[in-house]
Amino acid sequence: MEKMKKKRILLKIGSNTLTKETNHISRGKIEDIGRQIAQLKDEYEFIIVSSGAIAAAKQFVKLEHNGQEITVKQALAAIGQPHLMRIFQENFRELGLFTSQCLLSYSDFEKEVSKENICNTISVLVANNFIPIINENDTVATDEIQFGDNDKLAALTASLLKVDLLIIATNTDGVYTKDSITNKDPKTIELVSSLSELQKEVSSEKSSLGTGGMQSKIEAATIARNAEIETWIVNGLKDNFIINAMGNQSAFTKII
């Protein structure tokens, strides 16, 4: 009997989700993510794009510096990345899940050879039940630190790997209508078919720890849509956020 082909999900987790809006990485949140993946692994294969290297480093060090802030952030990323991966590895291993690290740069998406290499490597990892955990190679690239908390990286990766669904975990119940934010009673826009209409509802505010904000999520959804991939913007701070979204038991934004 032919083995059922699993659906492929790219899960993007921002710094605010991973830290649960504190100043350090939440092991509980990483365990929550791992527990859901373990529950869904018979039907879905997961690829993770994770921010949080800088947040992980801030728990351990305060760097002296005489240079630009961006250089300090790159140094923090270099210190924090192994810690971040260790926390993923330890928590996932207890759930019977194996992890692997992939560091990418935007320039990798501009060359055919490197695009092919990314696809081939990730295919081998996924086929052997190793979950790829992708982050931008912050020590050589400044794009993510300056421009968008890995949202764009997640969308480019999702497109390249032809995933079935892009889930962006953030710290809100999806995208809220502008009026409801003004009235301090946030209402989620649940289904979006027009990105230009959605754009009108988005405020330009950025989140406290991340560098993204809703604008970069809309841009990511646009890249995904051009590759015919559906995007869900969900509240990653809540427990069981993937499974609850799948069962329509939570408010989130679905961009089709």
Image: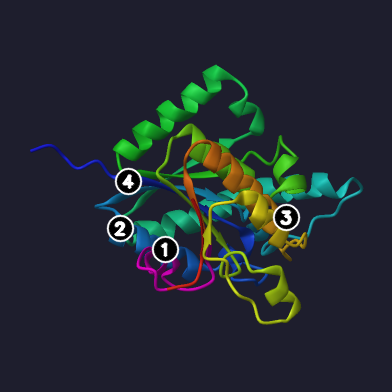
Q: Nearer the viewer, residue 203 or 152?
A: 203
Q: Nearer the viewer, residue 249 or 38?
A: 249
Where is residue 190 shown, x and y percent of the image?
52, 65
The residues bearing labels 4 and 1 have C-alpha atoms spaced at a distance of 14 Å
Q: Which residue is mark 4?
A: 7
Q: Which residue is mark 3?
A: 211
Q: Which residue is mark 2?
A: 40
Q: Decide: marks 2, 3 in contact (CB < 8 A)?
A: no
Q: Is residue 23 visible?
A: yes
Q: Amino acid at mark 3?
A: Thr
Q: Residue at x 60, y 53 (%)?
A: 51
The residues bearing labels 3 and 1 have C-alpha atoms spaced at a distance of 23 Å
Left or right: 72, with 58 as reference point: right
Question: Mark 3: which secondary structure?
Answer: loop
Where is residue 68 shown, x and y percent of the image?
89, 46
Q: Decide: marks 4, 2 in contact (CB < 8 A)?
A: no
The residues bearing labels 2 and 3 have C-alpha atoms spaced at a distance of 30 Å
Question: Mark 4: which secondary structure?
Answer: strand
Q: Is residue 149 visible?
A: no
Q: Decide: marks 3, 1 in contact (CB < 8 A)?
A: no
Q: Decide: marks 3, 4 in contact (CB < 8 A)?
A: no
Q: Decide: marks 1, 2 in contact (CB < 8 A)?
A: yes
Q: Earlier in the sequence, mark 3 or mark 4?
A: 4
How packed mark 1 is, by other alpha carbons closer than 10 Å (few <14, some 14-19, many 20 or more), is many
What's drawn in magenta, residue-wise?
234-249
Q: Nearer the viewer, residue 149 or 204?
A: 204
> For residue 92, which quarter of the picture?
bottom left
**Quarter placement of the N terminus:** top left
Q: Earlier in the sequence, mark 2 or mark 3?
A: 2
